[in-house]
Amino acid sequence: MPDEKAESAPLREVVGVFADADTLEAATEELFASGFEREMISLLAGEKAIVEKLGHRYQRIEELEDDLAAPRIEYQSKENLAATKTALLGSFVSIGAVAAAGAIFASGGALLPTLGSGVIGAEVGGFLSGVLGDLIDERRTSYVQEQLNHGGLLLFVRIADRGEETVAKEILMKHSGRDVHAHALPIGSP
């Protein structure tokens, strides 16, 4: 029979504010190494999403630390973003090469002397991938700067029990997190 106490215990999360992306990244790496799952870790969403959901702007990040309605985004590590960019590169290079090969086939081979167009197609695909990769980098940089302008990067770590709460708090403080604390979440929170 399931433990009724565990079922009725309020969900909790640990919150911390980081002064830069590097210390936040180091804290999340240690959280992952300590057994916390990716879906347990989130960041405050961008200002536009906050205004849309809450109906107002905020001046300081501290205003939203304990606002349970504040929108969140999934945490993405630098490695995860690099993998996304690599996947884009491969996709666009392949698409460019296949498109060039399709043009040769559609021409009934008349374009066969331009076999090098597969390389050109791959280069165009690589260029498009590079542009999208730069866009991803710009969006991340813009997001980080926007958050820092309001006082820091706000990290949320969902916890299952008091033991995880203690570990999460220690990790966030070890990596220079400030205002580290826990709060209850409403029952039924995802």
Image (cartoon, rainbow, N blue to C red):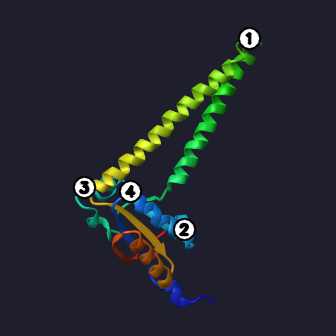
Sequence-wise, the earlier of marks 3 and 2 is: 2
Q: Where is residue 161 in the image (x, y as percent from the top left)?
A: 50, 82
**Tag 3 residue:** 57
Q: How crowded is mark 2: few (under 14 residues within 10 Å), some or many (20 or more)?
A: few
What kind of element bears circle 3? Answer: loop
Kindly identify which numbered label has been placed on residue 17: none
Count of numbered badges drawn on the protein? 4
Distance between the alpha carbons at the discs numbered 3 and 2: 32 Å
Tell me the SS state at disc 4.
Answer: loop
Characterize the local packing of mark 3: few (<14), some (14-19) or many (20 or more) Cα atoms within 10 angstroms: few
Label 2 is placed on what type of residue? Phe
- Quick one: label 1, few (<14), some, or many (20+) residues within 10 Å? few
Q: Where is residue 129 in the image (x, y as percent from the top left)?
A: 55, 35
Label 2 or label 4, whichever lies nearer to me, is: 2
Residue drawn at the location 66% of the way across and 32% of the way down: 94
Give the labeled residue for mark 4: 45
Which of the two discs, 3 and 2, sits closer to the camera?
2
Secondary element type, mark 1: helix
94 on left or right of 144:
right
Identify the residue at image location x=66%, y=23%: 119
Say what amino acid the circle numbered 4 marks: Ala
Q: In which quarter of the image is the N terminus?
A: bottom right
Marks 4 and 3 close (CB-CB < 8 Å):
no
Q: How far is mark 1 from mark 4, CA to CA?
A: 52 Å
Image mark for residue 113: 1
Q: Which amino acid does label 1 sit on?
A: Pro
**Which badge, 1 or 4, is on the more N-terminal residue?**
4
Would you say 104 lies left or right of 43 here? right
Report the disc number at residue 32: 2
User: What kind of residue is marked 3?
Assistant: Arg
